[in-house]
Every structure is written in structure tokens, then in C-alpha cells.
Image: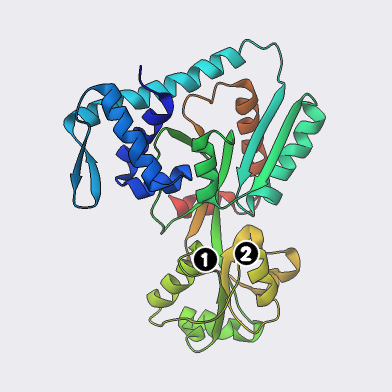
């Protein structure tokens, strides 16, 4: 009998292509992954893996088993959903992991709404990066991950997950008010010699600033790096540096710093669940509620933003 946890590691390896990546996804050591995969190979009675230097790939037998494993894992989730459907009402606990802006924008309003409409449903929320939220979802530690995916950042392999896009959030430029006229005349190049504030290197916002500058023919002078779009907005409010941030992170009092008319890309905010769990009444209710809340998140910009995304 094959062990379900080991089968999950095989599915991960098929998706990610390396033991190191599997270990990062599951938050365990690479040696532990290798050991469990060796045991799985013994259980299967076939050669599942081939080593090419430091890379561990799948043989034809391994690929065949991985295809069946994916179906097995979905079937397990579907079985859990089918059992949940036998309940006569929504009840129990659902855990959510959400990126920073996903909490005030989506998770908190959903909790407030459901506390009134479904008092028997308990919602637990924790803040994580999108990558960490997906890892917890795969590990079964949470039931829903609210994530953001930037246009220009490679998307993680789905690997048995199902994403429901909730809204497309455009990126906007915050710039000192005295520079707005020059930007309208010259474009983003007007800020070539000015300071910038953005996120950590290789973060979505950090990449957005560098891409925008390079498209305009200059390398942005990043003087400040902060974690969190809200913190970046707070520093941009001093008008000592320009910033590119998601539209929903800009408070009303700072909307005067937005330079309109620039196409800077954006990010898609999604609710992600394990494939097969969508029929679970608790999860289905939360997905419906999140879609309803997201529809009101950008009331005057949704159609425009979605057209840009497509």
C-alpha cells in the first residue's frame, strides 16, 4: 500500500523538478524528501527516479505513477467534500492564509459578514506571503489561500490547486506633486534622477519599479526598501521619493499623489483551494462571499482594470 504523504512528495517533484524545491514547499529538509522518495520507490517496486548530476528526475514509471497520484489526491479531497455535503448546515472551522493586503481588503470583510450570516462557522486567519500561504495550503494547514500574482512574475505550478480570480488590481505611480506636470509631458523618464522607495529586492513591487524604469530608459535610484505596500505609501506621502504600489494600498488622503494614465501592470488577487475541495459547503460559501466582496473592492475601476489584465 502506497503512503499518501509520500505520494504527495512525488506529485511535488513532478511539478517542481527538484528535491530542494519540494523541501521548500513542504517545509522539510531535502534529506527527508530524498529518504521518503526512496521508500516510495521500494513500495512501488519500480524504478521511479533517475539522477542527472544534482537533479532528480522521473523515469517513465515515475511519470505514470505521478499522473495517477494526482488523481488520487484529488479523489481524497473530493471524498472529504462529499462527506461535508452530508451536513445539514454550514458549521465548523475554516482556516485562511492571506497576503498582507488580502486581510483588510477581503478576509476581514468576509469574517465580519459571515459572523452575522453564519454564526456556527468559525474562520481563522493568518497573515503570510503568497508563497507561504500556498505552502500551508498544500500541507493541509489551511483551507484557503488568498494570494496575489504579479503580471511579470512567473506563476508557480498549480500542482492540484484550483485558483478563483477575485479581482485585478492595477499598479499606480505615487510621485511628489511638484513632478506631476513633468511626468505628464515627459513620461516616467521625468523621474530618472529622483529617489525611489519600493519593496525588497526580487519582491513583486521591487521588480515592478525596475521594469518600469528600464522601459522608460533609466535605472531607478532606489534609496529606500520597505516591507509592505502600506509602509511604502507612508514614506511616499512625505514626497521625498516616488513609488509604484497596488491601487488598493493607497489611502484616500494620498490619492492626490497618484499620476494617472500610466500603464504599469498589475496583480491578480485569487482565492486558492485544493482541487476537489470546492464542493465542501464551508469552502463554497467562503468563495462565494469573497467573490461578492471583491466585486465591490474597486467599484470605479474594475472594468478598466480587467480589460488591462486581459
Q: Determine whether, in the image, residue 217 is placed left or right of residue 279.
A: left
Closer to the camera in the image, 156 or 237: 156
- For mark 2, what is the residue? 229
Mark 2 or 1, nearer chain start? 1
Measured from the top left, where is residue 211 in percent x and y?
Answer: 41, 71
> 18 left or right of 202?
left
Per the model, the C-alpha gap separating discs 2 and 1 is: 8 Å
Q: Which residue is mark 1?
A: 205
Q: Position of residue 265 (x, y in %)?
A: 47, 61
Q: How many residues crowd around disc 2 within 10 Å: few (fewer than 14), some, or many (20 or more)? A: many
In percent of width and height, residue 166 lies at 56, 42
Specify whether residue 66 is in view: no
Residue at (49% x, 22% y) in the render: 77
Tell me the SS state at disc 2: helix
Residue depicted at 54% across the width and 33% down the height: 140
Element type at marker 1? Answer: helix
Neighbours of disc 1 within 10 Å: few (<14), some (14-19), many (20+)? many
Q: Which numbered dot is residue 151?
A: none
Discs 2, 1 touching: Cβ within 8 Å: yes
Colour scheme of the picture: rainbow
Amino acid at each position: 500500500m502506497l503512503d499518501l504523504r509520500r505520494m504527495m512528495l512525488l506529485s511535488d517533484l513532478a511539478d517542481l523538478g527538484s528535491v530542494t524545491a519540494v523541501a521548500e514547499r513542504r517545509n522539510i529538509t531535502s534529506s527527508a524528501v530524498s529518504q521518503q522518495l526512496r521508500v516510495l520507490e521500494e513500495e512501488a517496486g519500480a524504478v521511479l527516479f533517475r539522477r542527472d548530476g544534482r537533479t532528480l528526475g522521473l523515469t517513465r514509471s515515475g511519470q505514470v505513477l505521478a499522473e495517477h497520484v494526482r488523481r488520487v489526491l484529488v479523489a481524497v479531497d473530493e471524498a472529504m467534500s462529499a462527506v461535508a455535503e452530508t451536513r445539514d448546515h454550514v458549521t465548523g472551522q475554516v482556516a485562511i492564509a492571506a497576503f498582507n493586503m488580502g486581510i483588510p481588503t477581503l478576509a476581514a470583510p468576509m469574517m465580519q459578514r459571515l459572523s452575522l450570516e453564519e454564526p456556527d462557522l468559525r474562520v481563522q486567519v493568518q497573515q503570510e506571503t503568497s508563497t507561504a500561504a500556498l505552502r500551508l495550503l498544500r500541507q493541509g494547514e489551511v483551507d484557503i489561500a488568498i494570494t496575489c500574482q504579479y503580471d511579470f512574475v512567473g506563476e508557480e505550478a498549480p500542482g492540484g490547486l484550483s485558483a478563483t480570480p477575485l479581482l485585478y488590481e492595477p499598479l499606480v505611480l505615487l510621485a511628489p506633486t511638484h513632478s506631476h506636470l513633468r511626468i505628464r509631458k515627459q513620461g516616467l523618464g521625468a523621474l530618472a534622477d529622483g529617489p525611489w522607495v519600493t519593496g525588497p529586492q526580487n519582491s513583486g513591487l521591487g521588480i515592478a519599479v525596475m521594469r518600469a524604469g528600464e522601459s522608460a530608459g533609466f535605472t531607478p535610484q532606489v534609496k529606500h526598501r520597505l516591507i509592505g505596500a502600506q509602509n511604502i505609501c507612508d514614506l511616499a506621502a512625505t514626497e521625498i521619493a516616488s513609488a509604484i504600489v497596488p491601487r488598493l494600498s493607497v489611502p484616500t488622503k494620498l490619492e492626490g499623489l497618484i499620476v494617472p494614465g500610466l500603464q504599469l501592470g498589475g496583480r491578480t488577487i485569487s482565492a486558492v483551494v485544493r482541487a476537489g475541495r470546492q464542493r465542501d459547503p464551508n469552502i463554497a460559501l467562503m468563495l462565494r462571499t469573497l467573490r461578492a466582496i471583491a466585486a465591490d473592492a474597486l467599484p470605479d475601476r474594475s472594468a478598466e482594470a480587467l480589460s488591462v489584465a486581459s
